[in-house]
Image: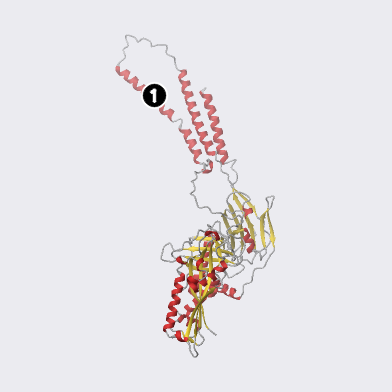
Amino acid sequence: MRFVWAVASFVIAAILIAGGIAQRTVFLGPNTERAELGVSADQPYTMIDGEVFNKLPGVQTLMVGGSGDIFGAIAVKEDVAAWLADSSYNHVTLADDGSITSTVVAPTEEAPAADETVQKGIDAATAAGLITPNSASPVGSDLWTDEFTTDTGSMIRKMRLPDTMAVLIATDGQNPAPSDIALSWAIDNSTPWAGPLVVLGGIALIVGILLYVLGIRHMRRSRGPRRRGVPPLPETQPISVGELDAAEKGVISSGTKKRGRRSLIAIPALVVSGALLSGCTADAWPKFDEPTTTPSPTPTVIVPEDQEKPSVTEQQAEKILDRIATTAAAADSSLSIDVASTRLSDAVLAARATNYTLRATLPDVPALTAVPSKPYQIIVPEAKSGWPRTILAVWQDEADTTVAPRILIATQNDAWSPYKVSYLAQLEASAQTPNLAPAELGANLVRPDSSLLVMAPDQVAGAYADVLDKGATSEFAASFNLDVDTFLPKITAGRQQQLDTFNTTAEGQTGTLEFAARAGASAPVALMTVDNGAIVAVNVEETETSKPSVADAVIKLDGNPRVTALTGVTQSQTGFQTTYSDQLFFFVPGQSSGEKIRLLGFSSDILKAEVLP
């Protein structure tokens, strides 16, 4: 019976081991599947939808073949289509039946032509190596979440692209895009039961060998003579002690040899099992889910039902802001307003134009607040799919706490334009940044005339300008939290000091010095906070006007080299007017909060100086 069980164990072992080996050899399927995209039309661009990449699950590998330079970019599908709206292109999509199709899309609109000033800035930035010389080239667009280039004539890129994204393929935007494009997917051909089958087969083999050995041992014992009794010894044949010791030693020696031979029988089974298991990889074993950690609670942010997705990702925003910082730094060092105009706008650009003029003639004039580079502590993109779209960012130097934190707003006007910083200021040391939505959710812009706040964004600049002129007597003073406002005391003290200096030169009897503030030319920008308030950036312009009050009197610019440098004169019979530009960031609470408007940060720079007519 032992032989029957041994044979059964051998058969089971053979079946299990053969099945495990067959899963890794004969029945092992392919590990990839390839699909040619079939792009045949000669167009400058090829757009591949994310659905095409997700035709099959798993890691996607994009393979592009051509000659020379090849460019690829990843972006939101709608952003790629918007960027291509002024050009014809190949559009690769996934049909309802699962087939991959390619069609040619005609232009739907014309990109806005750059005016003379913008083109001048583009030429200057191109000469500085900050942007591509070809305006039609997709290289460096702020729309791309990622981009990659090669000059080897072939490109292989692995990715996991969701359906909402798309890939753009091109060369230089003028020559035809590569037509040899294919996709491949990694197919899961793991055999998780191959290893267990081989192990079970090895165990069955060892069991069979043991049963076989036991069967042989039992058979040998059953064939020996059966002792019926101990025969009597002859009286004339005594057994000596020496013979008895020899006999005992012989038995002991014989028994040792038999056990040594039998112990070697199990070695082949162990060798066979080890050899089989050595060829099994991790794919030949079952994978069990790793234990998941309990997530820590985070503050709940209620997203409005109609809110769109963020216009950029946090990583994309950091890359955009880093590009802006690089261009601004190059412009600040070269004093090139043309280069600055490619990444700065509105109040920020106007203040730098004056600063560059002053620094060209007055070396002691310091540069303005620099646009910081990454990393940023807070990034809040606007939740919007169209244009214009906005980014708010807060930066702080983690290595040097003496450097004032900075806050900025950057805006992109259309799909073809780069993001430009329109507001930049230093945060007050005591400023508490309101609760802002995370970058992965974004936030909505508040309408300029919104009645949801304690004051509409388009009224904040004018109201605060009145407070600068009248102080606590202003009708709007009660709307602002002046206890935490450090800008107003600085302006008030500075005006008084200038007035005292003006009067001590006897000009008080022959001239007048007046101060006034008004809403600036830059439009306000308001981004909603989590608690239904908004961070509002506004522009206020302050003027200092000095005029003679008697005939034949003149206004001299003693001790004011900046106005002299801007006007080109040292005195005037009509007087001077100097304008300063203030960039101010406020937290404007919601109507039902009961809070006051709070100043968060400010920047004040000379804007212009002119001789009065």
256 vs 122, left or right, is left
- Identify the residue at image location x=57%, y=41%: 25
User: Mark 1 — residue?
Assistant: 255
Viewer-proximal residue, 303 or 188? Answer: 303
Residue 533 is at least partly visible in this image: yes
Quick one: quadrant of the C terminus?
bottom right
Residue 570 appears in the picture as rendered: no
**SS at mark 1 in the image:** helix
The picture places residue 454, in percent across and down from the top left corner, at: 55, 63
| Coordinates of residue 498 in the picture (x, y in percent) | 44, 79
Question: Which residue lies at the image location 68% right of the left edge and 59% below the top edge?
Answer: 40
> How many dots with numbers?
1
Q: Position of residue 224 (x, y in %)?
A: 45, 17
Q: Position of residue 551 (x, y in %)?
A: 50, 90
Q: Nearer the viewer, residue 311 or 463?
A: 463
Q: Which is more toward the observer, 145 or 449?
A: 449
Q: Please tell me how crowded label 1 is: few (under 14), some (14-19), or many (20+) other residues with Cα within 10 Å.
A: few
Asked where in the image residue 236 lies, by quadrant, the reply is top left
> Hey, which residue is sitting farthest left in the picture?
241
**Rendered image quadrant of residue 83:** bottom right
Q: Nearer the viewer, residue 138 or 114?
A: 114
Q: Residue furthest bottom?
A: 552
Q: Amino acid at mark 1?
A: Gly
Query: Where 404 sits versus 30, above or below?
Result: below
Q: Is residue 527 above or below residue 573?
A: above
Q: What colour scheme governs how the chains and residues are painted in the rendered image of this protein?
A: secondary structure
